[in-house]
Image (cartoon, rainbow, N blue to C red):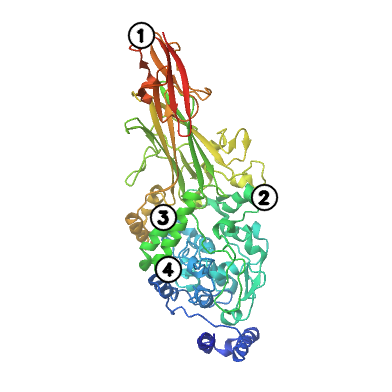
Amino acid sequence: MGGRMGRHQRALQANFAKIPIETMNRRRLIALILPLVAISVGSLITGAYHPDRLQAKDDDEWTLRRMGELCTEEGVYFTGSGNCVNCHAPDPEGEALVDEYGNSVSPVQDWQATMMANSARDPFWQAKVDHEGLINPEHREAIENVCTACHAPQGFHEAHLTGTAGVNGYTMSDLMQDELGLDGVGCTGCHAIDDIGLAGRFNGDLPINPDHVAWGAFENPWDGLMSGQTGFIPAFGEHMRGSEVCASCHSLYTHTQDLEGEETGQVFFEQTTYLEWVNSAYNAENVQCQTCHMPLVEGGAIAATQPNWLFPQRFGRHHFVGGNAFMLKLMRDNAVLLNLSAAPSQFDSTISRTIHSLQRETALLHVRQLASAPEEWVFEVELENLVGHKFPSGYPARLAFLEFTLIGEKGDTLFQSGRWTSDVGIHGRDLGYEPHWDEISDPDQVQIYEMVLGDVAGQTTQVLERAAVVLKDNRLTPRGFSTMHPVHDTVQVGPMAALDLDFNRKDGNEGSGTDQIRYRIPATGADHTVQASVKLHYQAVPKRWVEALFEFSDESERIAAFESMYLDADRTPVVVATALGRGWSGFDPSVSSWKVAPNPVSNGQLMRLIPSNEALPQSIILLDARGRAIRELSTNEAFVGYAVQDLASGVYYVQLNFEEHSETIRWVKQ
């Protein structure tokens, strides 16, 4: 213990020596003196952990080196995330910031490779801001000021609160020269938010604490070192556990411009993720944003590497997982060019969590055969949204689509809707936008769940300031979503989905968070049994959304840079959910048991099996009166009809063998 304390004591003293005494106010000076006095008398305080201290594993070594590149700027209201590393990086002793299995839960390490951490350096966002400014040059700086409020909150609010922002606000030019701004949604960008009217705020309008209070979810934080080393005083804030702290940057509106760039006086809600959660069952059930995006460590964790007498408390992992695996991969592959601090292994971890969340926690998919006449196949696909907001949600580029494939008895494709290839994208997608479908019968019809913006002329647009109407919004609503909720006028679905009687309704009840769609396909071949394969795909940055952006690549280095990265990236959609279903000719779900028809069977007639609404049998065996097997029938023979003129008159049986049971049907040959 003594050796460890000595090492940390030297680290502390080295850190304190770097702080100019003349710049300290009285509160900081007192906060510094107390820990020094405690160290001098041999207390249990341990000391700072230096980011250059290397761990044994190669990944840890690389990670810690990259942590040293985090922002260390100090502003009046904010401090860079690099100033939080000393106490919140992975613990080399393996005692603090670990879960019950010894895995790191370091908030810095987990946050560093997220979209939150890299929000200001996000090349798509930077390119899109340039695009909006090039479309409406008179509003360029105003647009940049709005966009930086959420993507660079520390730089934005520091500039506005200190009066250093220009006449037109905090611009992209300001951001590119501001390390605090380029720190993205840094530590103090969230922890400095006061609990003042949070639920009613929009567009990054954050109430920033003026007294260097760092709000957190710990009920009894200890301020022995933090205020001395960073100038921020830890304090418990109940609001840090609630969704309202996320509201302002996840509730965004624009002031609509006409095609000449003049304001119409209309406000258009571009992103409403928080309000979608408000209008959901999750709100009533106290399932907060943090429940999913910052999952708690089971059993809690020690929140800092010093002092060494801290004990485990309630601790939320700083995963901030969304659905944008595409941009995470793009940034990982261009980290040097983008000057990102996270190591590849950190990006890989965040990407893995993102894909896991998309595939395990986002949506359920079911497929079943409906009553089908011999000349057609009819299947119903049901989707169920599992998240606490619309899916997809957030930035309006995002979409999900269904791929439905009908496979014949020999494995050949009989029908396909929603095929995707890298050169075309979604096959069959209409040039303007694809309608919302309740029934599909043609391969050129495809179900796409998306938000489509329209300008003042009713034409589709990807220019956010020109958005005037919602041409389509059939994104899956969360469970509990109600047309009677007070915020429904802000988060309502688009006109086509609103007319779909089974959209967000099940058994006549609203709020199911589901949608049902039928696929009606002509049975043109000789197949009598088929398999329906359904996949739900997700895309964060579809090609169609960025094509208009790339038209300006000659006028913007940032657009040109993103275009190069985008074209080199793997744009394959993420498969969110899959489902398989079997079907057979003449299926009638109202039939509760398998039958033979006709019965009795006369010479010249075919003995045919009539299916029920249960699963297809694994085998079908023809038996004589003594129960001896005569032969095994294929499903095709049984459903089309089997010639029995070679059998003698008498009693026979058909044995149906299912996965967990068998059924026997008696029939008579005349």
Amino acid tagged 2: Ala
Spot occupied by residue 104 in the image (x, y as percentages of width and height): 49, 68
Disc 4: which residue? 342
Disc 1: which residue? 604
Residue 284 image label: 2
Q: Nearer the viewer, residue 434 or 380?
A: 380
Residue at (33%, 47%) from the top-left corner? 422
Foreground label between 2 and 3: 2
Foreground label between 1 and 3: 1
Q: Please tell me which of labels 2 and 1 falls first in the chain.
A: 2
Mark 1: few, some, or many residues within 10 Å (few <14, many ≥20)? few
Residue at (33%, 58%) from the top-left corner? 564
Q: Please tell me which of labels 1 and 4 falls first in the chain.
A: 4
Foreground label between 2 and 1: 1
Spot occupied by residue 417 in the image (x, y as percentages of width and height): 39, 36
- Secondary element at image label 1: loop
Amino acid tagged 4: Ala
